[in-house]
Image (cartoon, rainbow, N blue to C red):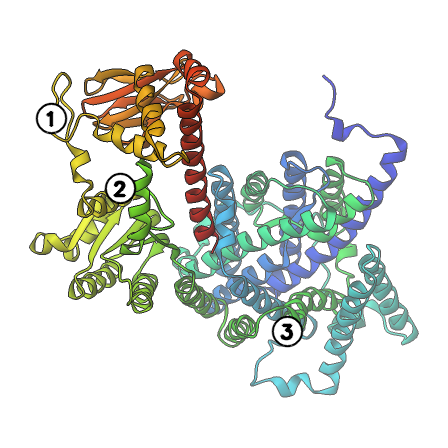
Amino acid sequence: MNPPKSLKRTPQRLLPTLTTALIAALVSTTYMISYGSLIFSGELTPYLASGIGFCLMGVVLIASIEALLSGSPGLVAIPTVNSAVIIASMAAAIASQLDGQSETIFPTVTAAITIATLLTGAAFLGLGWFRLGNLIRYIPYPVIGGFLAGTGWLVVRGALKTMTDIPLSVANIDQYLQAEVLLHWLPGVLFGILVLMLVRRYKHYLISPLMILGAILVFFLLLWLSGSSIQQAIQSGWLFQPFPPGALWQPPPLGDLAAVDWSTIASQAGQIATLILISSITLLLYANGVEVSAGIEIDLNRELRACGTGNLAAGFSASPPGYTIVTMSVLSNKLGARSRLVGLLVAGLCGAVMLFGGNWVALMPKVVLGGVLVYLGLTFLVEWLYDGWRKLPRTDYAIVVAILLVMGSYGLLPGLGVGVAIAAALFVVRYSHVPVVRHTLSGNTLHSRVERPSTHFQILHQEGQGLMALTLQGYLFFGTANQVFEQVRAELLSRQEHPPWLVLLDFRQVSGIDTSAALSFLRLKRLLSRQKILLAFTNLNPKIEQILKTDVLTSADRDAWRVFNDLDHGVEWFEDRVLHGEGGERLAIQAQPGMIQDGQERGGLALIFVALSEQLELADDTETAALMDMMSYLKRMEFEKGQALIRQGEQGDALYFLDAGELVVELSTDGGQSIRLARSGPGTVIGELSMFLNTPASATVIAELPVIAYRLSGENMRRLERENALAASALHRYLLKRVAQRLLMALDTVEALAE
């Protein structure tokens, strides 16, 4: 069996892989020691060695599983500072609740970390499995910024506690200003600021590891120059107490489960929910950051599944949750180390430190670890407070600051609550400003699919202002539905000279409405009723129609509203009412094949001949004779209801002049469905395109009512052109005018939609 391509190494490609892995392992080890000291501080300090071991084991599991399962070789995933600071907050709360119960604190904290990481992994896996990763994108950007800025402050505050062993609060701020305490934390803060400035200025991958190594060397150089011993540095709080012999990570004894206080863990449900939310958000942001910086495509859902699997494994080692790290992943791509071997080597090197480097880890200066944490925390604060001032609108910036202040003053849960409340308020306010009226059209720019004689089109154009059609979109609640009411009222005021008698609302692109939206439509119905204007609804799905039936679509005022299946049928109904009022009703007489009714036979044909005569410049009997002579080329045909005149796919060799009845044009899809394309009444022509283009018919034409039609075959058309040039010219010009008229109507509609 051949190894995967990404694991095949050549000497030229092995060097950048090893370089990337060594740098990432050094930085990861430093981060994990920092996270361990952040989480296991205060009353949990005696368990610091185990805490660092938990974090290092997290690197081993998360980095190796990410390397094997990720869709993008070269990505590096480790436990993150965002997770660590929330875990630290949860651990501190548990330690406070169990104050004095030394035998219970460590097992309970360990169990809480395990549960939190397992649930985070399960959430990642679920989002990725059901391909729901994009749901995270719907969280408002300033709310995300507020969470991350608040996380950054909590990291900085934790860094100060790591360096001084004194929790930062308003009450003990004076202690931080004492010379001895100041000496412990100020160098670390300055170191963190310096690293941040250099990284932002030069953006070189060696800055962080070299600064960390340099700071460690400077610390021990100063310790040597001062004549102090390691033991004195430990007693003065510069170094940690020596760790127990053996590996840093030890599996928790099963017997410790009996000492776990499960009720205390349950009280941290809010913290765990916050951890899952912020971890999901940050994973998305980090993945996007890698895509932009490294110029690669990342399958977010696959990344969620890979990180979810890694966290499920890491949960059993009591590691904080982890996911892809931008800096390390971008580094591997920039150095040409796009290999799964990078993550595996990082896991192996951190595993070696975990197993054999306990004595060396204990010598890590607190001031350096605190400085690293300050750097990480300031990264978020500077991005959202300093950079955000230039990039964000002032309203969004104020939201970031508000969430930061709440998280800094009251903790994670209140910050989460404020963030959720602001997100909900932002959604309501901003969505209410999203236009729900997509288009406002009149009968001059919106036409049905009914083919009509040109004289009817002229009437409809004259009376087009009688229709006001609004196409709606999105989800309608009280705020957005009120937009519809206000826009209709404004349109009525602007159309006082030519007021509409029908207002038509199309719901085809409306995803849903709530009951408050129905009140706005009730107000609209009453407004229109007072002005004798009819209200019509189209494309109502059953759920929306059911909501409207309560107050709007009531039987008591049935004459005030109409409902149509779709927009086309609604516009068709409007056109029919207009033509009915203009004497067009005589053309609606149903044909009865074999019988001639008064005013019916040759009625539609007469309209066509009137239009044909308009194409001729003659004004004497020659004109009449030429057109009447054309009758000899036509064949009178009768069709029963449901009978097809033209079938889709068959060769077109004739056109039909519709004299009486109605035709419907339908398109058959590959799925077996029939879509209505048009309806044709008396005085129209069918089949000209396929006959002139000599192509198969693109749709089927069926008699919707009994039909009388006159057929002009292709052969007779050619005879007409040879024998009666005057009539043939009139017919060609008439058909060309019909095509031009359709094009102009379509352009009117397109222009109206563009506006």
Question: Depth-wise, is mark 2 or mark 3 nearer the camera?
Answer: 2
- Residue 151 is situated, as x and y percent measured from the top left of the image, at 58, 66
For this rendering, which residue is in front, 528 or 187? 528
Residue 111 drawn above or below residue 370: above
Q: Gap in Å between the C-alphas at discs 3 and 1? A: 81 Å
Looking at the image, do the residues carrying marks 2 and 3 touch, with CB atoms under 8 Å apart? no
Name the N-terminal-most of marks 2 and 3: 3
Residue 258: x and y in percent read 43, 50
Three-letter code, disc 1: Gln
Residue 393 picture location, percent across and down? 57, 71
Disc assigned to residue 277: none
Horizontal side of 597 relative to 497 (left or right) equals left
- The one of 182 and 410 positioned closer to us in this rendering: 410
User: Which residue corresponds to mark 2?
Assistant: 572
Q: Nearer the viewer, residue 180 or 467?
A: 467
The image quadrant where one finds the N terminus is top right
Mark before the other along the chain sequence, 3 or 1 = 3
> Does any portion of residue 682 appear in the rendered image?
no
Q: Residue at x 60, y 78 (%)?
A: 168
Q: Neighbour class for label 3 at 10 Å: few (<14), some, many (≥20)?
A: some
Q: Residue at x 44, y 20 (%)?
A: 690
Disc 1 and disc 2: Cα gap in Å?
Answer: 26 Å
- Please state which of residues 35 and 641 is positioned toward the viewer in this rendering: 641
Q: Which residue is mark 1?
A: 597
Picture quadrant of residue 17: top right
Q: In the displayed structure, does residue 446 sit left or right of residue 303?
A: left
Is disc 1 surrounded by few (<14), some (14 to 19) or many (20+) residues within 10 Å?
few
Amino acid found under the numbered disc labelled 2? Glu
Please report whichever mark, 1 or 2, sits nearer to the chain's N-terminal start.
2
- Which residue appears farthest toward the right when viewing the image? 225
Would you name the residue on which mark 3 appears?
A: 389
